[in-house]
Amino acid sequence: MYSQDISVLLKEADNLEKQQKEPEALEKYRQVLTIEPANMRSLVKSAELNAALGVRQADKSSKRLYIETAYAFAKRAYYADSANADANYAMAMTSGKMTDIETENKKLVAYIRDVKLYADKALTINPDHARANWLAGKWNYEMTNLSGVKKAAIKLLYGGLPEASYEDAVRYMEKCRTQDPYFAPNYLDLAKVYRDDHKPAQAIEVLTKLVRLPTRTSEDVGVKAEGAKLLETMQ
């Protein structure tokens, strides 16, 4: 009986997501979790949707609340099954979002470290995990772009971080593109890597594909708009 209820609720949540009705989809996932508190799909999706809603909040306290909620759901997923690739991806993704709201240096560095730690763990479990590949690539891109001052601060607090490069960023993001050719945020980040690595032709190719992708989520709307702007500046 319960498993039937859960499959119906998950289907409804999926349909609401496709209609870009995130709060309503979240409510369906909440209902699943009242029946089965360790339902992995609902925990990971709740983390993703809260993070996506948080990024779009203009009000700082609302943004913090959504992102901290996303992180709490990711932790629940990880505690439910730490050997699950999706749970590790959720921890990596929400750790990345926590860097946007954290002001204390030591905690900030710990979150930066956790993005890499959990993305790597997800990829050890499933090397073809599209979004974990994207996060590993994004981490390499952002660490390569860090200013000398920030790198020095990280070294001081953490004793340095693993090596990062544009080459690794491209490798991971191209793998993500192969595994999920419709995941828009990866295209935007990949184009930025190619641009900063002085490969404009590749950047333009990726951006041209990005703007033609179908819009599958509310997040895609903003991502594609940013991609279109970037494409204009490069042509």
Image (tube, grey):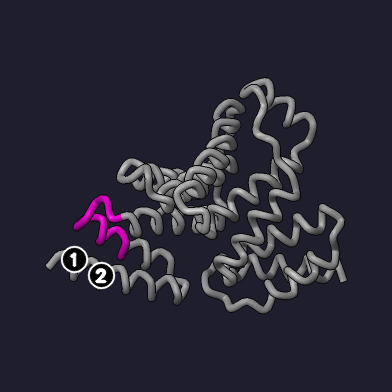
Query: Could you say which is closer to the camera, residue 81 or residue 64?
Result: 81
Residue located beneath label 2 in the image: 7
Figure quadrant of the N terminus:
bottom left
* Rendering coords of residue 66 (x, y %): 46, 50
The kind of secondary structure the magenta stretch mainly shows is: helix
Residue 122 marker:
none
Can residue 229 be seen?
A: yes
In the picture of the structure, the residue carrying the numbered disc 1 is 3
157 sits to left or right of 150? left
Q: Is residue 205 magenta?
A: no
Does 194 sit left or right of 18 as displayed?
A: right
Q: Who's the residue at 70% across and 36% down the image?
A: 163
Q: Nearer the viewer, residue 72 or 185?
A: 185
Cα distance between the residues tagged 2 and 1: 6 Å
Residue 16 x, y percent position in the rendering: 39, 73
Q: Indicate the amino acid at tag 2.
A: Ser
Vertical placement of residue 88 versus 16, above or below: above
Q: Over which residues does the magenta segment extend?
A: 28-39
Local crowd size for mark 1, using a 10 Å CA cut-off: few (<14), some (14–19), many (≥20): few
Check if residue 38 falls in the magenta segment. yes
